[in-house]
Amino acid sequence: MFTGIVTDIATVRMVRDTNRDRRFEIATSYDLSTVDIGASISHSGCCLTVVEKGADWFAVEVSGETLALTHLGDWRVGRRINLERAAKVGDELGGHIVSGHVDGIGEVLSVTPEGGSRRVQFRAPRPLHRFIAPKGSITVDGVSLTVNAVEDDTFGVNLIPHTWEVTTLGDLAAGGRVNLEIDMLARYLARWRETA
């Protein structure tokens, strides 16, 4: 489990297809002596398992399913990504409860300055858009955000300068693709309604 609060901006240092799947090596500022092999880390919202590590990098292996359902298939050497280590019992829950299971790929429609902040409009894939509500939570590339407005399959968020500067969301531009994870409570409420 994660909270959607980014703790490092890492860089993809190697991409290689293997006989198993696709392997990424990630350069990070984390103290890797505190990261175990088998640890779960959120990579721009996608929970992946550490399979190897060096002094300032670690490796993950990504299945074809994950490549198809996220934007990880777009990653190339030099790509900046948001990282978050798994939450520990007793950690501050600064964002919201995030599973690291990407629900779909959203499209950036516009990025508009608004004071010192940025207003960003996204299009969510159908039927995922049904689970996004005004003032609800959503995870965009691993960042916990509050939804400001929703109209059909589009929604908007406001990014304060801090979020713009300390996450890869500062790289957003119209036409870009982002990993989306809907709020876990919305997912369970929808399932309950289907079966009640």
Image (tube, helix red, strand yellow):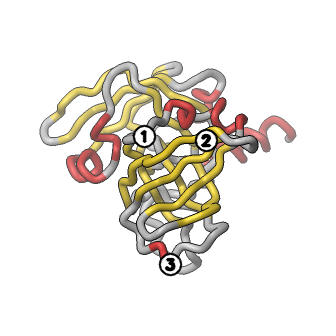
**Residue 58 left/right relative to 1:** left
- Looking at the image, how many numbered discs can be counted on the residues? 3
Residues at badges 1 and 3 in contact (C-beta under 8 Å)?
no
Residue 134 percent coordinates (x, y): 46, 37
Q: Residues within 10 Å of mark 2 (few under 14, many from 20)?
A: many
Which residue is located at x 52 percent, y 61 percent?
58
Of the residues shown, which amino acid type is indicated by label 1?
A: Val
Please say if 17 is above or below 175.
below
Of the residues shown, which amino acid type is indicated by label 2?
A: Val
Residue 22 percent coordinates (x, y): 64, 41
Q: Quadrant of the N terminus?
A: bottom right
Q: Residues within 10 Å of mark 1 (few under 14, many from 20)?
A: few
Label 2, on which residue? 102
Camera-nearest residue between 152 and 78? 78
Disc 3, SS: helix
Camera-nearest residue between 11 and 99? 11
- Sequence-earlier tag: 1 or 3: 3
Which residue is located at x 17 percent, y 33 percent?
114
Please say if 34 is above or below 185.
below
* Disc sitting over residue 77 in the figure: 1
Separation (CA) of disc 2 from disc 1:
22 Å
**Residue 55 left/right relative to 186:** left
Camera-nearest residue between 152 and 22? 22
Of the residues shown, which amino acid type is indicated by label 3?
A: Thr
Label 3, on which residue? 34
Q: Quadrant of the C terminus?
A: top right
